[in-house]
Image (cartoon, rainbow, N blue to C red):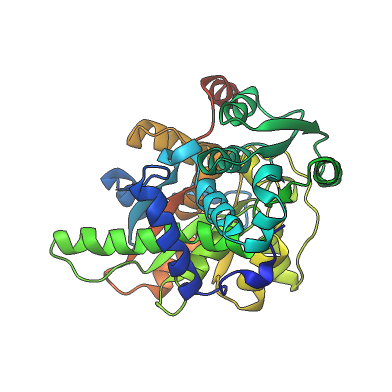
Amino acid sequence: MADPRTSPPLSREGVLAAQSIIKEFQRKGDIHFTPILSSKFLNELASTPQTPEKFKGGPWEGNEPARPKLRLWFKAENLQKVGAFKVRGAFHATSRLMKEEGWVKSGGREKGVVTHSSGNHAQALALAAQTMGIPAHIVMPSISTPLKIAGTKGYGATIHFSGSTAAEREAVVADVIESTGATLIPPYDHPDIILGQGTLGIEIQEQVEELKAKAGKSGGLNAIITPCGGGGMLSGTALSCEGTGILVFGAEPEFEGADDCKRGLEVGKRIESVKTLTIADGLRTHVGTYPWTVIHDRRLVRQMFSVTEEQIKAALRLVFERMKLVVEPSAVVGLATVLFNEDFRKLVEEEADEDGWDLGVVFSGGNTSIEALGKLFST
C-alpha cells in the first residue's frame, strides 16, 4: 500500500488538504457535492419523548423518557457516486498514490491497484481507477450481492472471488499482488482513506452554517453522528471537527457483537475480530488501527451508541416513507440512535441549552435492491 508516512497529518488541516483534491474531482463531475436534507416530521419525532411502554423488558424500563430538542440535518451520501461516501477515500488515496514518483517509475500505473471489499469500497476504487486510467483488481467474497458485483464489474475492474472471512480475503489479495504487482488500497485502515472520508464532515459543517444563515439564524452544528464499521468515516469526521467545538458520535448495530467500537471503548482496547450477520451489512467489520487512534487514543469521538435490528428497520421505514429516499440499513444506524437510544437522547437533554441541538446525521449509502428490501420487511 502507499506509505502512510507520506500522508498528510491526521488532523483538521489534513482533511482540508484532502478537500482541495476532492473539490477538483467534484468540479469535473467525478464526485458529487451531496445535498443537506431536512424533515420537519423527523425533527418533531426526535424531539418527542418515547412512550414508557417501549422500555418494557429493556435497560431503560422504569426511567422517565428523555426530552431532547433536536433539529436534524441529513448529509445524503446515498446520492453520492456509486451510492456511498466511499468514493471520497478511494479517489483521495488513488490520486495521492499516482503522484508518488517512485510508484510511477516502478510501473505503478500499469500494475494498478487492488483491494478487498464486499461492495461499496469495491465500486468506489473501481470507479477511481477507471477515472484515472489504471487497472483495478477487486477481491470480493463469493457471497457478495449480484448488484454490487455487477456494479464493480461495470466500472471495469477485474474481480477475484474469495471466502467471506478477513483471512480468506487477505490471502487472495496477497496472491493478486504477487501475480500483478498491484498496490493495495485498503477499505478504511489508511490515513489517505480517513482524510478523504473526512471531507464529508467539512461539507456538512459549511452547508448547515450556510443554510441557517439563509434562514436568518446564526451558528452551525452542535454535533454530528455517523455510522461506524471500520471507522474510516467516523474518524475522518472527527478530524474534520477537531478544534471546532462540534461533538462527534458514532453509531453501530448491537446484533451479534457488531458494536465492537463501543465495547472496545468500554474496556479500553480495540476489538480485532467481529463475526456478525447484522442487517447493516456495511458495518460487519471491526474498527481499524488508524481509526482507533483517532477515536480512542485521541478521544476525538465523544461516545459510541448501539441500536437493535428492529430499531434499524424502523428508522429505515421512516426514511423511505417520510423522506422518499433509498438508503441501505447501514446508513440509518445514526438516525435510529437519535430516535430510539435513550442514553443518547438523555445526553442531548442534559447537555443542550433551551434551544436544543442542531445535529448532523450522515446517510452513508444507498446500495440496496428492491428484492433485498422486500425480504427485509417481510420478516
**Is residue 273 among what the camera can see?**
yes
Residue 135 x %, y %:
65, 38
Residue 347 place in picture, x, y as percent: 47, 69
**Nearer to the camera, 112 or 119:** 112
Left or right placement of residue 201 versus residue 256 in this view: left
Q: Taking 43 as reference, is 293 left or right?
A: right
Residue 363: x and y, percent? Answer: 45, 46
Rendered residue at 47%/41% (across/down): 315
In percent of the image, x 69 and y 41: which residue is there? Answer: 117
Q: Nearer the viewer, residue 251 or 378?
A: 251
131 and 149: which is toward the camera: 131
Residue sitting at x 64%, y 65%: 291
Labels in figure, total: 0
**Along the horizontal axis of the image, is 141 left or right of 175?**
left
Q: Is residue 30 above or below residue 373?
A: below
Q: Quadrant of the N terminus?
A: bottom right
Pick the front one: 94 or 327: 94
Residue at x 57%, y 60% (from the top left corner):
99
Residue 64: tell me if it is visible: no
With respect to residue 22, does 177 lie above or below?
A: above
Q: Is residue 192 left or right of residue 174?
A: left
